[in-house]
Image (cartoon, coloured by chain):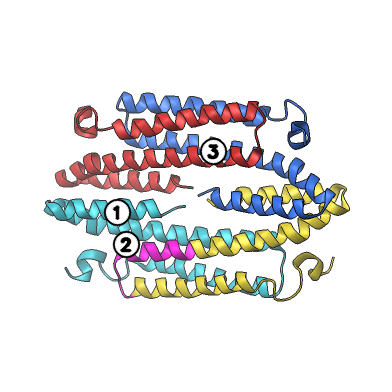
Chain colours: A cyan, B yellow, C red, D blue
Amino acid sequence: MKSTDRHGPAGVNADALKRLRRAEGQVRGIIRMVEEEKYCIDILDQIEAARSALRKAGQLILRRHIDHCVTGAVRSGGAESDALIDELMLALDRQGR
Amino acid sequence: MKSTDRHGPAGVNADALKRLRRAEGQVRGIIRMVEEEKYCIDILDQIEAARSALRKAGQLILRRHIDHCVTGAVRSGGAESDALIDELMLALDRQGR
Amino acid sequence: MKSTDRHGPAGVNADALKRLRRAEGQVRGIIRMVEEEKYCIDILDQIEAARSALRKAGQLILRRHIDHCVTGAVRSGGAESDALIDELMLALDRQGR
Amino acid sequence: MKSTDRHGPAGVNADALKRLRRAEGQVRGIIRMVEEEKYCIDILDQIEAARSALRKAGQLILRRHIDHCVTGAVRSGGAESDALIDELMLALDRQGR
Protein backbone atom coordinates (compact mmCIF):
# COMPACT_ATOMS: atom_id res chain seq x y z
CA MET A 1 0.00 0.00 0.00
CA LYS A 2 1.51 3.33 -1.05
CA SER A 3 1.48 6.20 1.42
CA THR A 4 -0.89 8.13 -0.82
CA ASP A 5 -3.44 5.33 -0.35
CA ARG A 6 -3.19 5.68 3.36
CA HIS A 7 -2.78 9.39 3.74
CA GLY A 8 -4.25 11.15 0.76
CA PRO A 9 -2.42 13.66 -1.42
CA ALA A 10 0.42 15.78 -0.04
CA GLY A 11 -0.79 18.85 1.81
CA VAL A 12 -3.79 17.20 3.40
CA ASN A 13 -1.92 17.14 6.71
CA ALA A 14 -1.28 20.89 6.62
CA ASP A 15 -3.91 21.69 9.23
CA ALA A 16 -2.69 19.02 11.67
CA LEU A 17 0.88 20.27 11.21
CA LYS A 18 -0.16 23.85 11.89
CA ARG A 19 -1.76 22.82 15.17
CA LEU A 20 1.21 20.65 16.14
CA ARG A 21 3.63 23.53 15.50
CA ARG A 22 1.43 25.77 17.63
CA ALA A 23 1.53 23.11 20.39
CA GLU A 24 5.34 22.95 20.07
CA GLY A 25 5.53 26.74 20.52
CA GLN A 26 3.19 26.53 23.49
CA VAL A 27 5.32 23.87 25.19
CA ARG A 28 8.43 26.00 24.65
CA GLY A 29 6.55 28.94 26.18
CA ILE A 30 5.57 26.80 29.18
CA ILE A 31 9.20 25.77 29.74
CA ARG A 32 10.15 29.47 29.75
CA MET A 33 7.32 30.26 32.18
CA VAL A 34 8.55 27.58 34.60
CA GLU A 35 12.17 28.76 34.27
CA GLU A 36 11.07 32.35 34.96
CA GLU A 37 8.88 31.16 37.89
CA LYS A 38 5.65 32.59 36.50
CA TYR A 39 2.44 32.15 38.47
CA CYS A 40 1.42 28.47 38.75
CA ILE A 41 -2.20 28.92 37.69
CA ASP A 42 -1.10 30.69 34.48
CA ILE A 43 1.28 27.81 33.75
CA LEU A 44 -1.48 25.25 34.37
CA ASP A 45 -3.75 27.08 31.92
CA GLN A 46 -1.03 27.10 29.25
CA ILE A 47 -0.51 23.37 29.79
CA GLU A 48 -4.24 22.84 29.21
CA ALA A 49 -4.04 24.96 26.04
CA ALA A 50 -1.16 22.84 24.69
CA ARG A 51 -2.98 19.60 25.58
CA SER A 52 -6.05 20.89 23.80
CA ALA A 53 -4.04 21.80 20.66
CA LEU A 54 -2.59 18.27 20.63
CA ARG A 55 -6.06 16.79 21.07
CA LYS A 56 -7.34 18.74 18.07
CA ALA A 57 -4.37 17.66 15.94
CA GLY A 58 -5.17 14.08 16.96
CA GLN A 59 -8.80 14.49 15.90
CA LEU A 60 -7.67 15.67 12.44
CA ILE A 61 -5.31 12.70 12.06
CA LEU A 62 -8.02 10.32 13.28
CA ARG A 63 -10.41 11.76 10.73
CA ARG A 64 -7.91 11.19 7.91
CA HIS A 65 -7.31 7.65 9.15
CA ILE A 66 -11.03 6.86 9.09
CA ASP A 67 -11.59 8.62 5.74
CA HIS A 68 -8.72 6.92 3.97
CA CYS A 69 -7.53 3.80 5.67
CA VAL A 70 -10.60 2.39 7.42
CA THR A 71 -13.06 3.39 4.70
CA GLY A 72 -10.85 1.86 2.02
CA ALA A 73 -10.55 -1.41 3.92
CA VAL A 74 -14.30 -1.58 4.58
CA ARG A 75 -14.97 -1.12 0.85
CA SER A 76 -12.50 -3.90 0.00
CA GLY A 77 -14.19 -5.99 2.71
CA GLY A 78 -12.81 -9.05 4.39
CA ALA A 79 -10.69 -9.59 7.47
CA GLU A 80 -8.48 -6.52 7.00
CA SER A 81 -11.50 -4.32 7.62
CA ASP A 82 -12.27 -5.98 10.97
CA ALA A 83 -8.62 -5.79 12.02
CA LEU A 84 -8.50 -2.06 11.24
CA ILE A 85 -11.68 -1.37 13.20
CA ASP A 86 -10.29 -3.36 16.15
CA GLU A 87 -7.09 -1.31 15.97
CA LEU A 88 -9.09 1.94 15.73
CA MET A 89 -11.20 1.06 18.80
CA LEU A 90 -8.10 0.26 20.86
CA ALA A 91 -6.54 3.60 19.82
CA LEU A 92 -9.75 5.42 20.84
CA ASP A 93 -9.63 3.60 24.19
CA ARG A 94 -6.14 4.95 24.79
CA GLN A 95 -7.16 8.44 23.68
CA GLY A 96 -8.82 11.38 25.35
CA ARG A 97 -8.06 10.50 28.94
CA MET B 1 5.08 38.43 47.57
CA LYS B 2 8.50 37.38 46.25
CA SER B 3 8.70 34.53 43.79
CA THR B 4 10.53 32.40 46.34
CA ASP B 5 7.49 32.67 48.61
CA ARG B 6 5.27 31.39 45.86
CA HIS B 7 7.55 28.86 44.23
CA GLY B 8 10.05 27.62 46.75
CA PRO B 9 13.81 27.59 46.26
CA ALA B 10 15.39 27.40 42.79
CA GLY B 11 15.64 23.86 41.47
CA VAL B 12 12.34 22.67 42.90
CA ASN B 13 10.87 22.83 39.40
CA ALA B 14 13.54 20.53 37.96
CA ASP B 15 11.23 17.52 37.65
CA ALA B 16 8.47 19.52 35.94
CA LEU B 17 11.02 20.98 33.52
CA LYS B 18 12.38 17.52 32.70
CA ARG B 19 8.90 16.32 31.81
CA LEU B 20 8.14 19.47 29.81
CA ARG B 21 11.36 19.06 27.79
CA ARG B 22 10.42 15.43 27.14
CA ALA B 23 7.00 16.63 25.94
CA GLU B 24 8.67 19.20 23.66
CA GLY B 25 10.82 16.45 22.12
CA GLN B 26 7.74 14.26 21.69
CA VAL B 27 5.85 17.03 19.89
CA ARG B 28 8.82 17.59 17.57
CA GLY B 29 8.86 13.85 16.91
CA ILE B 30 5.14 13.90 16.11
CA ILE B 31 5.64 16.76 13.62
CA ARG B 32 8.32 14.68 11.90
CA MET B 33 6.04 11.61 11.88
CA VAL B 34 3.28 13.63 10.18
CA GLU B 35 5.72 15.12 7.64
CA GLU B 36 7.06 11.64 6.86
CA GLU B 37 3.49 10.29 6.64
CA LYS B 38 3.97 7.64 9.31
CA TYR B 39 1.08 5.38 10.22
CA CYS B 40 -1.84 7.32 11.76
CA ILE B 41 -2.34 5.04 14.77
CA ASP B 42 1.33 5.37 15.73
CA ILE B 43 1.01 9.17 15.49
CA LEU B 44 -2.14 9.11 17.66
CA ASP B 45 -0.33 7.09 20.32
CA GLN B 46 2.58 9.54 20.35
CA ILE B 47 0.09 12.41 20.72
CA GLU B 48 -1.38 10.63 23.76
CA ALA B 49 2.12 10.15 25.20
CA ALA B 50 2.88 13.88 24.83
CA ARG B 51 -0.48 14.83 26.37
CA SER B 52 0.22 12.48 29.27
CA ALA B 53 3.70 14.01 29.84
CA LEU B 54 2.11 17.48 29.90
CA ARG B 55 -0.53 16.24 32.36
CA LYS B 56 2.15 14.92 34.69
CA ALA B 57 4.11 18.19 34.52
CA GLY B 58 0.86 19.98 35.39
CA GLN B 59 0.34 17.71 38.41
CA LEU B 60 3.81 18.61 39.71
CA ILE B 61 3.17 22.32 39.26
CA LEU B 62 -0.23 21.99 40.93
CA ARG B 63 1.37 20.21 43.87
CA ARG B 64 3.91 23.00 44.31
CA HIS B 65 1.14 25.58 44.10
CA ILE B 66 -0.86 23.85 46.83
CA ASP B 67 2.22 23.22 48.99
CA HIS B 68 3.53 26.77 48.82
CA CYS B 69 0.93 29.27 47.76
CA VAL B 70 -2.38 27.84 49.00
CA THR B 71 -0.97 26.39 52.22
CA GLY B 72 0.75 29.68 53.07
CA ALA B 73 -2.43 31.66 52.49
CA VAL B 74 -4.52 29.25 54.57
CA ARG B 75 -2.07 29.61 57.45
CA SER B 76 -2.22 33.42 57.19
CA GLY B 77 -6.01 33.07 57.08
CA GLY B 78 -8.45 35.67 55.87
CA ALA B 79 -9.96 36.45 52.52
CA GLU B 80 -6.83 35.73 50.46
CA SER B 81 -7.12 32.06 51.40
CA ASP B 82 -10.69 31.80 50.09
CA ALA B 83 -9.75 33.63 46.88
CA LEU B 84 -6.84 31.24 46.25
CA ILE B 85 -9.03 28.17 46.82
CA ASP B 86 -11.64 29.62 44.44
CA GLU B 87 -8.92 30.19 41.84
CA LEU B 88 -7.57 26.66 42.37
CA MET B 89 -11.00 25.07 41.92
CA LEU B 90 -11.58 26.98 38.68
CA ALA B 91 -8.16 25.84 37.39
CA LEU B 92 -9.02 22.22 38.28
CA ASP B 93 -12.32 22.62 36.41
CA ARG B 94 -10.43 23.65 33.29
CA GLN B 95 -7.92 20.82 33.73
CA GLY B 96 -7.83 17.16 32.85
CA ARG B 97 -10.44 17.19 30.11
CA MET C 1 -33.79 1.16 7.98
CA LYS C 2 -34.93 -1.42 10.54
CA SER C 3 -33.40 -1.36 13.97
CA THR C 4 -31.81 -4.75 13.34
CA ASP C 5 -29.87 -3.22 10.46
CA ARG C 6 -28.53 -0.57 12.76
CA HIS C 7 -28.02 -2.52 15.93
CA GLY C 8 -27.54 -6.17 15.09
CA PRO C 9 -29.57 -9.02 16.56
CA ALA C 10 -31.23 -8.74 19.98
CA GLY C 11 -28.84 -9.48 22.81
CA VAL C 12 -25.84 -7.83 21.25
CA ASN C 13 -26.22 -4.94 23.70
CA ALA C 14 -26.14 -7.25 26.72
CA ASP C 15 -22.60 -6.27 27.71
CA ALA C 16 -23.27 -2.53 27.44
CA LEU C 17 -26.45 -2.97 29.52
CA LYS C 18 -24.57 -4.91 32.17
CA ARG C 19 -22.06 -2.09 32.52
CA LEU C 20 -24.79 0.56 32.54
CA ARG C 21 -26.68 -1.27 35.31
CA ARG C 22 -23.45 -1.48 37.29
CA ALA C 23 -22.99 2.28 36.79
CA GLU C 24 -26.57 2.87 37.97
CA GLY C 25 -25.86 0.87 41.14
CA GLN C 26 -22.64 2.80 41.66
CA VAL C 27 -24.42 6.16 41.35
CA ARG C 28 -27.05 5.01 43.88
CA GLY C 29 -24.22 3.96 46.18
CA ILE C 30 -22.56 7.38 45.79
CA ILE C 31 -25.83 9.13 46.71
CA ARG C 32 -25.99 7.00 49.86
CA MET C 33 -22.34 7.81 50.68
CA VAL C 34 -23.03 11.55 50.40
CA GLU C 35 -26.20 11.25 52.52
CA GLU C 36 -24.27 9.32 55.17
CA GLU C 37 -21.40 11.85 54.99
CA LYS C 38 -18.74 9.29 54.11
CA TYR C 39 -15.17 10.45 53.56
CA CYS C 40 -14.84 12.78 50.56
CA ILE C 41 -11.89 10.99 48.93
CA ASP C 42 -13.78 7.67 48.99
CA ILE C 43 -16.76 9.38 47.35
CA LEU C 44 -14.51 10.92 44.68
CA ASP C 45 -13.05 7.51 43.88
CA GLN C 46 -16.52 5.98 43.53
CA ILE C 47 -17.49 8.84 41.19
CA GLU C 48 -14.44 8.02 39.06
CA ALA C 49 -15.44 4.32 39.04
CA ALA C 50 -18.95 5.19 37.84
CA ARG C 51 -17.58 7.55 35.16
CA SER C 52 -15.25 4.80 34.02
CA ALA C 53 -18.09 2.25 33.79
CA LEU C 54 -20.07 4.73 31.68
CA ARG C 55 -17.04 5.33 29.46
CA LYS C 56 -16.68 1.58 28.84
CA ALA C 57 -20.38 1.22 28.04
CA GLY C 58 -19.94 4.10 25.57
CA GLN C 59 -16.99 2.35 23.92
CA LEU C 60 -19.12 -0.78 23.39
CA ILE C 61 -21.94 1.25 21.87
CA LEU C 62 -19.47 3.15 19.67
CA ARG C 63 -18.03 -0.14 18.47
CA ARG C 64 -21.47 -1.44 17.51
CA HIS C 65 -22.21 1.83 15.73
CA ILE C 66 -19.02 1.59 13.66
CA ASP C 67 -19.47 -2.13 12.98
CA HIS C 68 -23.07 -1.86 11.88
CA CYS C 69 -24.08 1.62 10.88
CA VAL C 70 -20.89 3.24 9.58
CA THR C 71 -19.55 0.10 7.92
CA GLY C 72 -22.86 -0.53 6.17
CA ALA C 73 -23.01 3.03 4.86
CA VAL C 74 -19.41 2.91 3.63
CA ARG C 75 -20.16 -0.30 1.74
CA SER C 76 -23.24 1.29 0.15
CA GLY C 77 -21.08 4.33 -0.65
CA GLY C 78 -22.25 7.79 -1.50
CA ALA C 79 -23.06 10.84 0.55
CA GLU C 80 -24.65 8.96 3.46
CA SER C 81 -21.27 7.47 4.29
CA ASP C 82 -19.59 10.88 4.53
CA ALA C 83 -22.44 12.25 6.65
CA LEU C 84 -22.15 9.33 9.07
CA ILE C 85 -18.39 9.76 9.41
CA ASP C 86 -18.88 13.52 10.03
CA GLU C 87 -21.46 12.68 12.71
CA LEU C 88 -19.15 10.08 14.25
CA MET C 89 -16.23 12.52 14.42
CA LEU C 90 -18.38 15.17 16.11
CA ALA C 91 -19.55 12.57 18.66
CA LEU C 92 -15.92 11.59 19.35
CA ASP C 93 -15.09 15.29 19.82
CA ARG C 94 -17.75 15.54 22.51
CA GLN C 95 -16.59 12.31 24.13
CA GLY C 96 -13.89 11.40 26.59
CA ARG C 97 -13.40 14.78 28.19
CA MET D 1 -13.02 14.33 64.19
CA LYS D 2 -16.80 14.59 63.98
CA SER D 3 -18.45 14.50 60.59
CA THR D 4 -19.50 18.12 60.98
CA ASP D 5 -15.83 19.06 61.20
CA ARG D 6 -15.16 17.31 57.96
CA HIS D 7 -18.31 18.12 56.08
CA GLY D 8 -19.79 21.33 57.41
CA PRO D 9 -23.38 21.72 58.51
CA ALA D 10 -26.15 19.45 57.24
CA GLY D 11 -27.55 20.59 53.93
CA VAL D 12 -24.24 21.72 52.46
CA ASN D 13 -24.23 18.62 50.24
CA ALA D 14 -27.61 19.47 48.75
CA ASP D 15 -26.21 20.67 45.44
CA ALA D 16 -23.98 17.61 44.98
CA LEU D 17 -26.94 15.34 45.79
CA LYS D 18 -29.12 17.16 43.26
CA ARG D 19 -26.54 16.56 40.52
CA LEU D 20 -26.03 12.93 41.56
CA ARG D 21 -29.79 12.28 41.42
CA ARG D 22 -29.89 13.87 37.98
CA ALA D 23 -27.02 11.57 36.92
CA GLU D 24 -28.92 8.57 38.32
CA GLY D 25 -31.98 9.53 36.24
CA GLN D 26 -29.78 10.00 33.18
CA VAL D 27 -28.22 6.54 33.58
CA ARG D 28 -31.70 4.99 33.92
CA GLY D 29 -32.70 6.87 30.76
CA ILE D 30 -29.61 5.52 28.94
CA ILE D 31 -30.49 1.94 29.95
CA ARG D 32 -33.96 2.47 28.49
CA MET D 33 -32.49 3.93 25.30
CA VAL D 34 -30.26 0.86 24.85
CA GLU D 35 -33.17 -1.52 25.58
CA GLU D 36 -35.33 0.33 23.04
CA GLU D 37 -32.43 0.35 20.53
CA LYS D 38 -32.34 4.12 20.14
CA TYR D 39 -29.79 5.67 17.80
CA CYS D 40 -26.21 5.06 18.98
CA ILE D 41 -25.02 8.67 18.65
CA ASP D 42 -27.91 9.88 20.83
CA ILE D 43 -27.00 7.25 23.45
CA LEU D 44 -23.34 8.32 23.35
CA ASP D 45 -24.34 11.95 23.92
CA GLN D 46 -26.49 10.96 26.92
CA ILE D 47 -23.57 8.98 28.33
CA GLU D 48 -21.40 12.11 28.03
CA ALA D 49 -24.11 14.16 29.78
CA ALA D 50 -24.24 11.68 32.68
CA ARG D 51 -20.42 11.62 32.93
CA SER D 52 -20.41 15.41 32.97
CA ALA D 53 -23.04 15.53 35.77
CA LEU D 54 -20.92 13.11 37.81
CA ARG D 55 -17.81 15.23 37.18
CA LYS D 56 -19.60 18.34 38.44
CA ALA D 57 -20.82 16.52 41.56
CA GLY D 58 -17.21 15.44 42.14
CA GLN D 59 -15.99 19.04 41.84
CA LEU D 60 -18.47 20.13 44.52
CA ILE D 61 -17.38 17.34 46.85
CA LEU D 62 -13.72 18.15 46.19
CA ARG D 63 -14.37 21.80 47.02
CA ARG D 64 -15.98 20.85 50.34
CA HIS D 65 -13.06 18.56 51.10
CA ILE D 66 -10.53 21.33 50.48
CA ASP D 67 -12.61 23.95 52.33
CA HIS D 68 -13.18 21.84 55.43
CA CYS D 69 -10.78 18.97 55.78
CA VAL D 70 -7.59 20.16 54.07
CA THR D 71 -7.90 23.77 55.23
CA GLY D 72 -8.51 22.67 58.82
CA ALA D 73 -5.49 20.38 58.80
CA VAL D 74 -3.24 23.08 57.29
CA ARG D 75 -4.31 25.49 60.04
CA SER D 76 -3.55 22.86 62.71
CA GLY D 77 -0.23 22.29 60.94
CA GLY D 78 2.04 19.29 61.29
CA ALA D 79 2.23 15.96 59.53
CA GLU D 80 -1.51 15.48 59.11
CA SER D 81 -1.59 18.43 56.74
CA ASP D 82 1.07 16.93 54.45
CA ALA D 83 -0.65 13.54 54.50
CA LEU D 84 -3.97 15.13 53.48
CA ILE D 85 -2.35 17.05 50.62
CA ASP D 86 -0.62 13.85 49.43
CA GLU D 87 -3.97 12.05 49.53
CA LEU D 88 -5.65 14.93 47.68
CA MET D 89 -3.02 14.93 44.92
CA LEU D 90 -3.38 11.18 44.40
CA ALA D 91 -7.17 11.58 44.18
CA LEU D 92 -6.74 14.34 41.59
CA ASP D 93 -4.40 12.06 39.63
CA ARG D 94 -7.11 9.40 39.48
CA GLN D 95 -9.73 11.98 38.52
CA GLY D 96 -10.80 13.57 35.30
CA ARG D 97 -9.50 10.94 32.90
Residue at image location 72% in from the left, 64% down from the top: A39
Q: Could you tell me how far apart the alpha carbons at marks 3 and 2 are, in whole angstroms?
A: 32 Å
Q: Residues within 10 Å of mark 3 (few under 14, many from 20)?
A: some
Which amino acid, by three-letter code, is at mark 1? Leu
The magenta-colored residue range is B36-51
Report the side of A67 relative to D43 (left or right): left
In front: A31, or A66?
Answer: A31
Does A97 appear in magenta? Answer: no
Q: Main secondary structure of the magenta part?
A: helix
For residue B37, what is the image quadrant?
A: bottom left
Residue at image location 16% in from the left, 68% down from the top: A1
Of marks 1 and 3, the one in the foreground: 3
Callout 1 secondary element = helix
Q: Is residue C11 above or below residue B44?
A: above
- Total numbered circles: 3
For disc 2, the marked residue is B41
Does B42 appear in magenta? Answer: yes
Q: Could you tell me how far apart the alpha carbons at marks 1 and 3 are, in whole angstroms?
A: 29 Å
Report the side of C24 relative to D76 (left or right): left
For disc 3, the marked residue is C46
- Cβ–Cβ under 8 Å for marks 2 and 1: yes
Read off the chain for label 2.
B
Whether residue B95 is visible to the viewer of this picture, yes or no, is no
- Name the mark on residue A88: 1
Callout 3 secondary element = helix
